[in-house]
């Protein structure tokens, strides 16, 4: 397979750095680049369309146990990037000389090169947008289409080369009934299908019709609830906020440290893993360590592992397992249960169907207690039948309870939820999650 | 970069009605000492430009890190293509917007002063780290700083030219203590809550030196403290919690693009509607809220926003009545309503949208002692640690690092996990006392998230301490 222009550029850049290195020095560098179309829509029309072409190189220079790093935007033409890159290398060389030795420096010294390229061309974005807006004719649609190639590269002076190139799209849109009553839908992947999109849009239209019924306001209290995979993504995201971090666990700052101490557990049906093999994130990290296909984190309700970055490994005498510095999952998978998805409403019986949650935060981190809001299509269910949308409600409850003593069951089917975040760059994170029925969920406002 | 950019821009070819270039050159240095171990320094240089074109009634943008003339021309062509391709389905008729030609300059305080060297920073951070790690129950601690310099250049086809130079210094201290199955974290005004424009003088303004020991001592006090009690009571919110209260329950609901629906798929909508401006009672008579880009040291001061609108101070809420939204030129045209110069982008690679910039509460007349003395049963809360609010920016729940009971007009027991909840539409009407200038602090956050594609932007909030009555307060489970 022919190399893309970006991959050729990165290989030449690495070769340039190889030649520029002095004896006793080691370098590593990463490339994060993308060519992204972003089309923002509102009221069934185009609000803000554009393209972003960006390339960032992070240089890491190591001399003995001293090291420093510099991240820079580059233009993508090595003839013009050569001088700034070499200047950055010289500046780093000047920096490391007067630094103390770093006792926690840890970088890959075994060479594990890899290459993943998944680059099926996508249809032109204006054609896709026309399809989307035509399908939403007469509806109040608001959303974002983000698409194009994303590149991640790693190289070091030991000869390791890793390349991850994926062309993907992520369409996320909401159909509004009125005020805050809406159905949110996502369609993402690698090959656009008009048929698959049409099916998603039909589903969204069907759920939109359910919002026409007058909404119910619930009194604060405990309710039986079904959390869809999209709602579970928000719950799982709270655990990803340092919960599985090796460093946060070692310093007792993780929301799961009581599981580590044996003072808390989740239901035996709950298992989490960092499943790189099943996600869309690269299988290598910034210091060059390869990621295992899967890292078990919680098995049968017990904390069995953590994500350990190279620095944490050195500091706490642990083995790194390919985590980046944030030690946050990028491909979290929660194992499914035994409840058939089509039986979820029957299992709920009477209670709250929560389509989405929103803006979660810890109200007591050591107790793993979180608060947040219901959002979008959430409904009151009576004897297994959706009867009315509900006005937004605030919950405040412990994940130890929700996924512990109050967990009724997890659906057998799970969904791949691809992150729509695009802070600084389009995210390559994803989660695979089932839905969950809980016997009690505490609502407060 | 400016001379060559200006020259290249003049040579670009475009058949659109109007086009502009917005270039950003931002340099950053990050230093940290964690548990007495200097962390490796990290620096960055981020340069690029966004070209925006109005054509046939549509608007498109293209951003590139290739700042050669050919690279800029390619981006301009791409932006022009987007403008034309989207014109027939555009939400906005961009022909109705003026072809602006703003001219001017802006500079942060201390942009000409020598920045601290790496060793000066490490010496200071190491000293604070040493002071903080004095007890075996302190399990993690870090002193760090992020220093940034940014040059923004805005050029338009109508002859506009704006150059703005910014300098930011954002120091941070954080200490976590653990014992008896509990962990408590204390910071200096929240994570990167000390964030201002200008140079190292921020350190003296906030007493950074010597804070390592104090913060660590407070973390240990929290570890030994009982949980915050629950019930209806008065709360005295210190400025480093008021920052969050203003941000979430005044700032976001007043963003005009939210009110117009742009953010409904992500950040959300607003309980505020267009018809409320001019008459709606947002808060008590004591509530005066200003958009103020002129306060030199505040994080989001500037001379022009990223759509080239000149920035001036304006009141959004006066004596409790809602007057004006946070909406830039484009939103103002859509809503047919006056706003402010707040169309902002978080970098060269994201388009401007309505953001908060500096959003402040004007000082009142009460000093802190008088505010405490006036509370029979309540709690003082300081330093935000938890924030959650619904997508209409109404039902909120916020938590703080530090609580201290107020009983019969006196500060008494320190309490941990102080939380409170309320509804924006009612909460500000319970504002009972507003602190005077002696309680006033200029703070902010570099991490306000919003937009599709997503953006994290710097916002400033200055506020006195404030008292609210009859608030639903509670503590934690731990």
Image: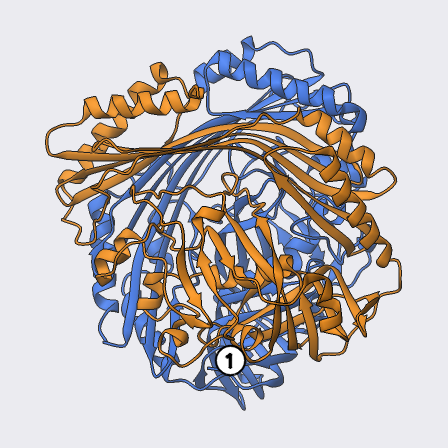
Chain ID for label 1? Answer: B
Q: Which residue is mark 1?
A: B476
Front in this rendered view, residue B126 or A165: A165
Front in this rendered view, residue A64 or A274: A274
Q: Position of residue B454 (x, y in %)?
A: 57, 43
Mark 1: which secondary structure?
loop
Q: Position of residue B458 (x, y in %)?
A: 51, 47
Image quadrant in which you'd find residue B311: top right
Front in this rendered view, residue B370 or A260: A260
Q: Position of residue B468 (x, y in %)?
A: 63, 75
- Is residue B264 in sight in this rendering? no
Q: Which of the chains is orange?
A: A
Q: Which of the chains is blue?
A: B
Q: Residue at x 85, y 43 (%)?
A: A139
Q: Residue at x 52, y 62 (%)?
A: A335
- Is residue B110 in sight in this rendering? yes
Q: Is residue A310 above or below residue B133?
A: above
Q: Is residue B110 above or below residue A391?
A: above
Position of B33 with respect to B347 (left or right) is left
Q: Residue at x 60, y 60 (%)?
A: A434
Q: Position of residue A111 (x, y in %)?
A: 24, 37
Task: List the single residue furthest toward the bottom.
Answer: B408
């Amino acid at each position: 397979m022919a190399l893309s222009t970006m991959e050729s550029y990165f290989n030449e850049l690495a070769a340039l750095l190889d030649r520029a290195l002095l004896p006793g020095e080691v370098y590593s560098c990463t490339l994060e680049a993308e060519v992204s179309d972003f089309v923002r829509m509102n009221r069934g029309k185009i609000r803000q369309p554009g393209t972003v072409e960006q390339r960032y190189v992070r240089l890491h220079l190591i001399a003995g146990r001293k090291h420093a790093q510099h991240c820079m935007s580059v233009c993508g033409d090595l003839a013009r990037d050569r001088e700034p890159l070499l200047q950055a290398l010289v500046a780093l060389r000047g920096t490391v000389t007067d630094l103390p030795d770093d006792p926690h420096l840890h970088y890959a010294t075994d060479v594990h090169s890899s290459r993943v390229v998944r680059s099926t061309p996508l249809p032109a974005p204006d054609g896709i947008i026309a399809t989307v807006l035509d399908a939403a004719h007469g509806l109040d649609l608001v959303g974002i289409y983000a698409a194009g190639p994303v590149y991640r590269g790693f190289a070091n002076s030991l000869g390791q080369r890793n390349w991850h190139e994926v062309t993907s799209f992520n369409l996320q849109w909401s159909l509004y009934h009125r005020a805050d009553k809406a159905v949110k839908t996502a369609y993402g992947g690698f090959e656009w299908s008009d048929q698959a999109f049409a099916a998603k849009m039909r589903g969204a239209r069907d759920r939109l019709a359910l919002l026409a019924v007058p909404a119910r306001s619930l009194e604060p209290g405990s309710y039986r609830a079904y959390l869809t995979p999209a709602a579970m993504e928000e719950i799982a995201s709270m655990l990803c906020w340092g919960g599985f971090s090796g460093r946060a666990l070692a310093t007792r700052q993780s929301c799961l440290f009581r599981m580590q101490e044996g003072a808390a557990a989740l239901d035996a049906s709950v298992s989490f893993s960092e499943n790189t093999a099943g996600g869309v994130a690269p299988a290598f990290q910034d210091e060059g360590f390869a990621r295992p296909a899967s890292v078990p984190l919680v098995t049968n309700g017990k904390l069995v592992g953590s994500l350990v970055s190279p620095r944490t490994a050195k500091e706490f005498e642990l083995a790194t397992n390919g985590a980046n510095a944030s030690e946050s999952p990028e491909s979290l998978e929660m194992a499914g249960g035994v409840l058939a998805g089509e039986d979820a409403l029957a299992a709920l019986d009477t209670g709250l169907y929560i389509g989405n949650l929103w803006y979660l935060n810890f109200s007591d981190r050591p107790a793993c207690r979180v608060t947040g809001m219901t959002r979008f299509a959430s409904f009151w269910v009576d004897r297994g039948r959706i009867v009315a949308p509900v006005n937004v409600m605030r919950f405040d409850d412990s994940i130890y309870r929700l996924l512990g003593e109050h967990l009724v069951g997890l659906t057998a089917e799970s969904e791949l939820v691809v992150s729509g975040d695009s802070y600084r760059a389009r995210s390559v994170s994803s989660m695979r999650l089932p839905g969950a029925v809980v016997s009690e969920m505490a609502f407060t406002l | 970069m400016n001379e060559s950019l200006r020259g290249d821009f003049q040579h670009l070819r475009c058949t659109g009605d109007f086009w502009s270039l917005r270039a950003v050159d931002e340099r950053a240095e990050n230093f940290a000492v964690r548990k007495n171990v200097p962390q490796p320094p990290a620096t960055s240089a981020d340069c690029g430009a966004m070209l925006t074109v109005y054509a046939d009634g549509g608007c498109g943008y293209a951003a590139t890190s290739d700042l050669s003339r050919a690279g800029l021309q390619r981006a301009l062509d791409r932006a022009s293509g987007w403008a034309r391709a989207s014109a027939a389905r555009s939400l906005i008729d961009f022909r109705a917007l003026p072809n602006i030609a703003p001219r001017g300059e802006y500079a942060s305080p201390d942009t000409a002063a020598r920045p601290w060297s790496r060793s000066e920073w490490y010496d200071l951070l190491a000293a604070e780290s040493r002071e903080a790690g004095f007890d075996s129950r302190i399990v993690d601690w870090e002193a760090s700083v992020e220093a940034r310099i940014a040059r923004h250049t805005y050029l338009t086809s109508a002859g506009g030219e704006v150059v703005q130079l910014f300098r930011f210094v954002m120091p941070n201290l954080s200490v976590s203590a653990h014992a008896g199955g509990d962990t408590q974290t204390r910071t200096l005004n929240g994570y990167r809550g000390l964030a201002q424009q200008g140079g190292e003088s921020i350190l003296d303004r906030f007493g950074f030196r010597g804070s390592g020991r104090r913060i660590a001592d407070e973390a240990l006090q929290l570890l030994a403290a009982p949980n915050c009690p629950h019930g209806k009571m008065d709360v005295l919110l210190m400025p480093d919690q008021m920052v969050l209260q203003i941000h979430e329950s005044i700032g976001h609901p007043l963003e005009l693009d939210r009110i117009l629906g742009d953010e409904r798929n992500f950040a959300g909508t607003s309980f505020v509607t267009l018809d409320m401006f001019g008459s709606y009672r947002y808060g008590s008579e004591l509530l005066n809220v200003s958009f103020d880009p002129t306060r030199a040291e505040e994080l989001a001061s500037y001379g022009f926003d990223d759509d080239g609108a000149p920035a001036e101070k304006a009141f959004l809420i006066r004596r409790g009545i809602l007057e004006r939204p946070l909406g830039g030129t484009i939103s103002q045209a859509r809503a047919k309503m006056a706003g402010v110069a707040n169309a902002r982008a978080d970098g060269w690679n994201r388009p401007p949208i309505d953001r908060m910039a500096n959003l402040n509460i004007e000082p009142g007349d009460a000093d802190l002692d008088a505010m405490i003395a006036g509370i029979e049963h309540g709690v003082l809360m300081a330093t935000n640690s938890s924030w959650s609010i619904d997508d209409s920016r109404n039902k909120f729940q916020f938590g703080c690092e530090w609580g201290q009971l107020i009983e019969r007009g006196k500060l008494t027991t320190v309490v941990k996990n102080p939380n409170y909840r309320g509804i924006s539409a009612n909460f500000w009407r319970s504002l009972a006392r507003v602190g005077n200038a002696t309680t006033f602090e200029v703070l902010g956050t570099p991490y306000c998230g919003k937009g599709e594609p997503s953006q994290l932007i710097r916002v400033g909030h200055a506020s006195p301490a404030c008292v609210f009555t009859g608030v639903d307060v509670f503590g934690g489970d731990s």
